[in-house]
Image: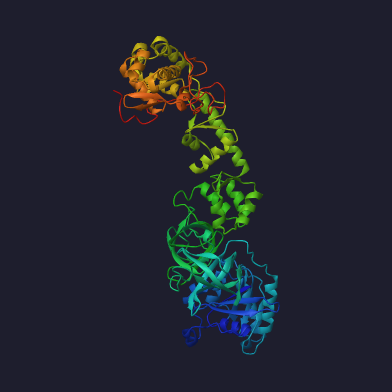
Amino acid sequence: MIIGTAGHIDHGKTSLVRALTGVDTDRLKEEKARGISIDLGFAYLPMPDGAVLGFVDVPGHEKFVHNMLAGATGIEFVLLAIAADDGVMPQTKEHLAIVDLLGIANGVVALTKADLAGPERRAELKAEIANALAGTGLAGAEIVPVSVVTGEGIDDLRARLFAAAGTLRPHAAQGRFRLAVDRCFTLAGTGTVVTGTVLSGAVAVGDRVTVSPSGLAARVRSIHAQNRPTERGEAGERCALNLAGDGITKDAVRRGDVVLDPDLHAPSERIDAKLRVLAGEAKPITQWMPVRLHHAATDVAARVVLLGDTPVAPGAEAYVQLVLDHPIAAASGDRFVLRDTTAQRTIGGGRFLDLRAPARKRRTPERLAQLDAHAVADAGLALTALLDRAPGYVDLAAFARDRALSIAEADALVERDAVIRIGATTLGLAPATWLRLKRSLAAVLDAFHAGNPDLPGIGLERLRLQLEPRLPAPAFSAMLQALVRAGEVSLDGAWVRLPDHEVKLTPPDEKLWSRIQPLIGAAERFRPPRVRDIAGVLTAPEAVVRRLFKLLSRMGKVDEVAHDHFFLRGTVAEMAAIACDIAAGAPKGEFTAAQLRDRLDNGRKVAIQILEFFDRHGVTLRRGDLRRTNKHRLDLFRPLADEPTTKPMSGGEASPVGRPDFKSGRGREPVLGGFDSHSLPPPSRSAS
């Protein structure tokens, strides 16, 4: 157990610790000369059962309250000293307020200099002290008269401390390791040593750690816990760590730094918190008010951003955002204290809620609802609450990191709540949200197919933006992949569709296609008119005809051999077969553009366009003016099931792209996505 002293200057805190432990905690020359504590002092007291009590003796002078706050970090039990000749004094009240703001609810009051007060004065003081403690975490604490001069009450107080150590629940060492540094020094023959209170988790000799917020990496060479050499230090202990690493020096590590598990290194400079303003404050907390923020052993300048509509009145609580001048290492749930910029008074304090506070939209109802969830102290209940609020998902890795949870603790929470992890991302959703999201996705796809039967599917980003919760793009992609594996959706490039969706033309498009098809088939199939000419023949808008051809190309019914020059897919297959036939009868299997032109009877220009199209897709291989067919690519233009060819195609098994059954999962449907003249880069040379 770690015991922290508190109380007004010259109320005997240091003398009392010396009487209890035999250790003089005033170690500085100036402290000896002035007879007051200026900086933190430390002492240790062995218990009968072999355990050790640690004492942190803090200064009582108002000028050194910042040092007092640094020493209050991680203490579990407060020893409040009140002198019998003075009673409750200003620093007594401020220290008591700080102890209350830090959430310390275990302690005892030592009525020091008891030899100076008779029975009546003692009774009067006890009533005064009880009144001061009322409404704080120490309300009802025992009051023990002690005197370091006569020895009165010292043994009784020591026994009470031993008893309290036996009743306090020990800290769990399951979280990730954090130690708040309050001293850093160099020992000859040892190197750099940091001391502080272990806030969570445990550390062992040889562990790799990080000094935050600077980010310096270090290795733990040796450990002293509660003033004893050991191989391991745990939460609730004062530890001295001998650190080694590049850049690890006495000047590189300062009071206020936190030595922690490397996975926890994520400094914060904008934090949402719950603030309680002390009832004795003269003025309310206003927007953008400058303050000094004290957390663990550090203090930093900050500004208060109100998240409500009105200033925070004395005695009231409210959500605020703290914008820091410099980042600090913290964890959600950590306690903090605010003091004024002149360091003359304590204003209030509270708990950190969200270390990743947004700079925009920080006062919306959705954001305030999130803060209600973050305010739940129990990590499991907080996770459940966050999953039930917008945006509907939680970054599980960030949640565990910011609460300093171990991997085992985080996994246990996820398993307990049956949280759905999305693919390889760290995002998690509640089971009900996952089901609602899948149903919403299916409904959006169904409605899109009903309104756009001629389209192969909806674009990925357009679909993502229509769903709630709106997942980040990587997580949405991972979700789709999971649904594809489960057979619930299908992906065709950038298009998402339901598995049973078939691209169909709208009635107007069907009617227009029925008029176009004869123009590019039958006798004219090897030299079909271009889009402009077809539009002129049918007196239809050119853009409408072009759009329909593009759609038919995606459906696999036509191929855009050259710009605005479309051929039926069956015709392309027939031309490929003719090219194979010409090559089969030619020496070395090589033929010219003129030979294909003569067989197709479609003119040199069109024949060259056809061969360049085949070249781009690897169906033909060109060398100078000669070409030969590539049997491994002939299946690219296999005829559709309902469009028989005039000649069988030769060649072995090849790429399945272009087959009716490729990717579609059905036996007799064309693949969504045909070829066009821009599918591959044009050849470097043109045929002569």
Q: Position of residue 506 (x, y in %)?
A: 48, 19
Look at the image and tell me in which quarter the C terminus lies: top left
- The scheme the figure's colours follow is rainbow
Look at the image and tell me in which quarter the N terminus lies: bottom right
User: Is residue 374 shown above or below 645?
Assistant: below
| Residue in the picture at 70% in, 70% down | 167
Residue 628 appears anywhere in the view: yes
In the orientation shown, which residue stands out farthest toward the front?
Answer: 587
Residue nearer the viewer, 492 or 76: 492
Image quadrant assignment for residue 241: bottom right
Q: Is residue 566 left or right of residue 242?
A: left
In the orientation shown, which residue stands out farthest toward the left?
Answer: 688
Q: Position of residue 502 (x, y in %)?
A: 53, 23
Count of residue discs: 0
In the orientation shown, which residue stands out farthest toward the top?
Answer: 523
Q: Position of residue 624 (x, y in %)?
A: 31, 27
Residue nearer the viewer, 196 or 337: 196
Residue nearer the viewer, 439 or 600: 600
Q: Position of residue 269 (x, y in %)?
A: 45, 59
Residue nearer the viewer, 377 or 523: 523
User: Is residue 176 shown above or below 674?
Assistant: below
Residue 472 appears anywhere in the view: no
